Every structure is written in C-alpha cells, then in structure tokens.
C-alpha cells in the first residue's frame, strides 16, 4: 500500500510519531485517509476547503490533547526529581546535624588550675581600663559605648556645615579600601563624599604603631581634594585641606599610646555594647571611680532612644533585673529592640545596623544550635528560678538540653572538642573557639559548681576562667595570630581576644555567608560600610562578657557570694 508508505514518511507523521504510539496512530490514519488511489481534490475547490477546515480542527484538537499529556508527564517528572532532591538534601542536612557533635567529649573534665584571686583582679582592672576608653560622651549629658578600637576619622565640610563619619551608613558615603597589615603598621585608603561632590576627599593613611614606646604615628597623603575639608581623629582636629594643585602635602602626627580613647570608633552598638556598659558600671564596676556617672549618662541615652536600660539578654550574667525577663529572653524578639528602630546618630557617633536584623527569625531558629544562645537560655532560667533542673521553655531536642544542667552537660562536650574553649557553631558544624561563648559557659558552670555543688562544673568553671585570662591582650599590646605573625597593637591592650584557634592563636571570627547573601538579596539591603579594617582582635561585647564572667566567678569561688 503505497499511500501508507508515502503518508508515514511525511514530516507531519514523523512529528506526530514523537507524541503518539505508532499503533494508535495507524488506527487513526486508516479512519482519516480514504483507501483510494485517486488524486486529491484541488485545494481551491469548495469541497477541498471544507475538507481542510475539518481536518485542521481535528488536528488542532489532537495537538492540544498531546500538549496537555506532555505537560502533565513532564510535570510529574519534574516534581518527582524535586522531591527526590529535597529528600537527599534533607538527609544530608540531618546527617550533618547529627554528626556535628560526633567530636564532643563531656566525659573528661579539665584539670586546669584555677587562676588565683589576685590574677583575676589584675585581669579585671586591665579589662576595665580598656572598656572605659571606649566610653564616649555625647551632648545633653548622654553617652554611648563604641563598638571597638580603631582609627575614628571624620570630616567636616565648612561650606555645607556637614559632618561625615567614616563608616556611617548614610549619604554622603564613605569608603575604606586596600588595607594592608604588618606586624607594627597598617595602611589603607579612605574616601569621603560631600553633599555636593563625589570623592571630595581621598587620602592614603599609614599608622605606625611602633613609632616609639609611648606614641604612635599617623601619616596622611591626600590624593584628591575637591573642596575645603577638615580631617578629625575623633575630637582631635588633625588638619585642613583645600582644593588646588600642589598645596596639600603629606602630613604626619604623633599621638600617645596611653590615651586609648583616641582609638574609640565612631560606631556604637546598643544591644551588645551600650546596654552592657550600662549593666557593668551599674553592677560589678560600680565602685570604679566615675562609674555612677557613666551609668547615668548611658541610661539617659537609652531612654532618649526608646530603649529600656538593663533590659538585655545579657542581664543574667550581671544578676540584674532577671526576675522581670521573659523565660525565653535569648530567643525572644524583645531582646533585639535595635532591629525595631535605630538609635540616633550625631556628629560624634553613629549607630551600627546589626546583621542579625537582616534575618532575625532565621538567626534565632538556627542560633538555638549554637552554644551562645544555648548557654544564655540555660543561664537565664538558672538565675531566674535558682533551680538547675527547671525546665527551659525552648524545644529540648533542638536546644540540646531541657534544663540548665542538661544544657551545661552538652556544652561540656563542646569544650571537649579542643579543651581550649567553647566553639562557635552552626547547625551543621563548629569552628573556632569563641570568647563570648566561653564566658557565658563559664558563668553557667560557675553557678552550677560553686552555688549548687556540682564538682564537674567547678572544674569547667576554673578552666574557662583560666582560658579567658590567658586570652587577654597583655600590657605589651602583642597579638599572636594564627597566620604566624605577632602584631603590635598597643591601643587594644587589656581587651580579650574575640576568637582563637589551636594554642590560643587569634583568628578573625567566621560568619555564615549564605544566609547573609540571601538576606541581603531578599531585603534589597547592603552591609554597613567599614570604619576600620585589619587586626581588630576584640571589641566592647567580648570585653564586657569576659569582665562579667570573671567578676561572677570571683564572687562565687573566692568571695562565696552566691545568690542561690
């Protein structure tokens, strides 16, 4: 049957065979094409046109049917593959979560000797000096706590009467780039826009921290000056630049190492700096000269900016107002008021926009697998109810403990990973040892050990105190880093290392990048610009946590001042 061979060989049939089984197609073919050898009707005749229209309608109907069949078949395949992929990813994630703590060892209490009371008191004194240097007075009798030690440049444009602070997250913008660190120096480029001019000032900065044993040197080489501008270091006027070729020469300035307030950042934080400063000078540091005045000024600033002084997730370590805190304070959104509104800025200081606020809910959910929030959850309930076996409000499986005693046992296993502190952890892995985690863990163990008579907890509290003292930057200002370099940064003396690796070598704290990138993309946000770069081994948060722990430890171990 030649007509069948011709028909089946056509392109139309070849395309159709891709969609339909051959058996069904042949059945339809016999019905649609008459078994005749007569020539086809002329295409222009009425009969042919009507015939073609009917054929096209049937063909269109068959095409729609085939398209729907293909869509649903491919949809099933795509869905199945997606479900399989999700199942595999979930399985891998669960495996990572389960295996994360495979290296934990809570069965070997440390045998580290406890630091003496004299050693602790000396460490506290030096830490207090560093923290006090970052205290910054403002107008109207208010004050804030600078985030860390840096090089606080700011500029003033006389023509517009406008102040621009390096790192401030608003217009006019600033920049810091090309940072290079050596053992005794650091250098980088700074840039400041004005309200009317881009790159109104660009300059290369070099700091020689070892210029002499008593002073450090700042050298400034202007690269662009497009309008008159004053350059300040915090409240110290360094120089004035004017536009014009050849009139702005490199300049150098020497400043005393003894005045650490020269290096306090323009940037301040509310939740983990200004609130902690208020708590510290109100409680443990209240006998230090000037402490009541500091606490009062900090409190006025907090009230003026609609924050409640002392209402902070760290209040339990200071034993301050714990009875009024929610049981779930560490994971309660009320503990993060700076995510609801940003404090005021001024010509002297500006508020930091915390990264946590970009993904607060996700941070709280995943943070319950981190020793940081785990320890704070346990310490809050312990200090509030004075019962190591009081049930925590959070889910015990995810928090890895349902009571303060159970959480402490889990964290003892985290300590056992290295024996050099408590690490920072995501739900999937743990990394470097962390000062803020070691401090709150030490406070929890000090309460359990010396106020509730748990012998193993005493050993962990002693070890944590020894580690915190050991990781304090000494009077010589030397910072031994994991990259093999020993850095001299005298303005950071007295602070406590933020994070360290094996043998207590300083490392910059890590942070998960994927959640941050997703949050920045979804919320169309950006990171706060840098104010300082390079070796910043500590900050106010780390130092106040360490000071609070050492004070609490000294009280319960040597002064027998338990509140239980």
Image (cartoon, rainbow, N blue to C red):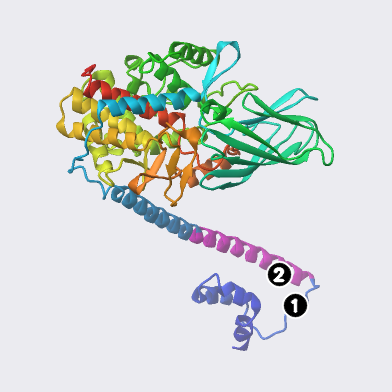
Of residue 94 and residue 455, the one placed in the foreground of this image is: 455
Percent position of residue 561, x then y: 23, 17
Report which residue position mark 1 lands on. Answer: 41
Residue bearing mark 2 = 51
Which is more toward the observer, 378 or 206?
206
In the image as oriented, which residue stretches furthest toward the bottom?
A: 2
| Labels in figure, total | 2
Label 2: how many Cα within 10 Å (few below 14, some 14–19, many 20+): few
Q: Residue at x 33, y 47 (%)?
A: 503
Q: Which residues are magenta?
A: 46-74
Q: Are marks 1 and 2 in contact (CB under 8 Å)?
A: yes
Q: With respect to residue 254, does 298 lie above or below?
A: above
Looking at marks 1 and 2 on the same chain, the residue that comes earlier in the sequence is marked by: 1
Q: Secondary structure at mark 1?
A: loop
Residues packed near mark 1 inside 10 Å, few (<14), some (14 to 19) or many (20 plus): few
User: Does residue 229 lie above or below 211 as drawn?
Assistant: above
Q: In the image, residue 262 lies at what x, y percent?
A: 57, 28
- Is residue 404 in view from this perspective? yes
The quarter holding residue 398 reads top left
Please determine whether, in this image, residue 398 is positioned above or below residue 342. Answer: below
- Secondary structure state at the residue bearing disc 2: helix
Query: Residue 86, position in %: x, y?
Result: 41, 53
Numbered label attached to residue 322: none
Majority secondary structure of magenta residues: helix
Q: Quadrant of the C terminus?
A: top left
**Residue sitting at x 42%, y 49%:** 482
| Of 105 and 153, the residue lying toward us | 153
* Cα–Cα gap, marks 1 and 2: 9 Å
């Amino acid at each position: 049957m030649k007509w069948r061979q011709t028909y089946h060989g056509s392109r139309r049939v070849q395309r159709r065979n891709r969609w339909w089984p051959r058996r069904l197609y042949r059945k339809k073919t016999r019905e649609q094409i008459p078994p005749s050898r007569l020539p086809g009707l002329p295409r222009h005749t009425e009969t042919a046109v009507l015939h073609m229209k009917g054929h096209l309608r049937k063909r269109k109907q068959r095409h729609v049917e085939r398209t729907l069949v293909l869509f649903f078949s491919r949809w099933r395949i795509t869905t199945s593959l997606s479900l399989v992929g999700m199942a595999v990813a979930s399985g891998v994630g669960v495996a990572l979560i389960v295996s994360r703590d495979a290296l934990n060892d809570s069965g070997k209490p440390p045998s580290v000797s406890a630091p003496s009371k004299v050693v602790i008191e000396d460490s506290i004194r030096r830490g207090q000096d560093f923290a006090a240097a970052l205290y910054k007075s403002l107008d109207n009798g208010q004050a804030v706590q600078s985030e860390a030690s840096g090089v606080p440049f700011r500029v003033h444009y006389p023509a517009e009467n406008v102040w621009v602070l390096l790192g401030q997250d608003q217009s006019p913008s600033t920049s810091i780039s090309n940072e290079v660190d050596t053992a005794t120096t650091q250098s980088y480029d700074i840039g400041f826009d004005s309200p009317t001019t881009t790159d109104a000032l660009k300059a290369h900065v070099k700091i020689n921290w070892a210029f002499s044993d008593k002073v450090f040197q700042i050298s400034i080489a202007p690269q662009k000056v497009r309008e008159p501008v004053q350059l300040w270091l915090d409240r110290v006027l360094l120089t004035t630049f004017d536009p014009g070729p050849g009139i702005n020469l490199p300049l150098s300035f020497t400043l005393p190492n003894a005045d650490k307030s020269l290096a306090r950042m323009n940037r301040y934080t509310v939740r983990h700096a200004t609130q902690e400063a208020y708590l510290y000078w109100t409680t443990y540091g209240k006998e230090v000269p000037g402490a009541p005045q500091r606490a009062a000024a900090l409190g006025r600033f907090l009230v003026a900016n609609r924050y409640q002084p002392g209402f902070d997730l760290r209040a339990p370590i200071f034993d301050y107002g714990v009875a009024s805190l929610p049981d779930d304070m560490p994971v309660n959104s009320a503990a993060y008021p700076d995510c609801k509104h940003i404090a005021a800025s001024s010509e002297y200081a500006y508020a930091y926009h915390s990264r946590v606020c970009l993904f607060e809910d996700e941070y709280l959910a995943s943070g319950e697998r981190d020793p940081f929030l785990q320890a704070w959850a346990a310490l809050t309930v312990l200090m509030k109810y004075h019962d190591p076996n009081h049930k925590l409000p959070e889910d015990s499986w995810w928090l890895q403990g349902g009571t303060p005693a159970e959480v402490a046992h889990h964290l003892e296993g985290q300590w056992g990973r290295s024996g050099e502190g408590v690490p920072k952890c995501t739900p999937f892995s743990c990394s470097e040892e962390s000062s803020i985690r070691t401090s709150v863990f030490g406070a929890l163990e000090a309460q359990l050990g010396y106020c509730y008579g748990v012998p193993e907890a005493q050993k962990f509290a002693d070890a944590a105190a020894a580690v915190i003292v050991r990781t304090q930057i000494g009077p010589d200002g030397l910072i031994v880093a994991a990259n093999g370099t020993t850095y001299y940064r005298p303005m950071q003396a007295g602070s406590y290392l933020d994070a360290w690796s094996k043998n207590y070598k300083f490392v910059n704290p890590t942070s998960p990048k994927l959640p941050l990138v997703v949050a920045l993309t979804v919320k169309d946000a950006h990171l706060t610009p840098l104010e300082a770069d390079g070796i910043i081994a500590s900050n106010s948060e780390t130092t106040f946590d360490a000071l609070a722990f050492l004070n609490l430890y000294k009280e319960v171990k040597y002064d027998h001042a338990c509140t239980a």
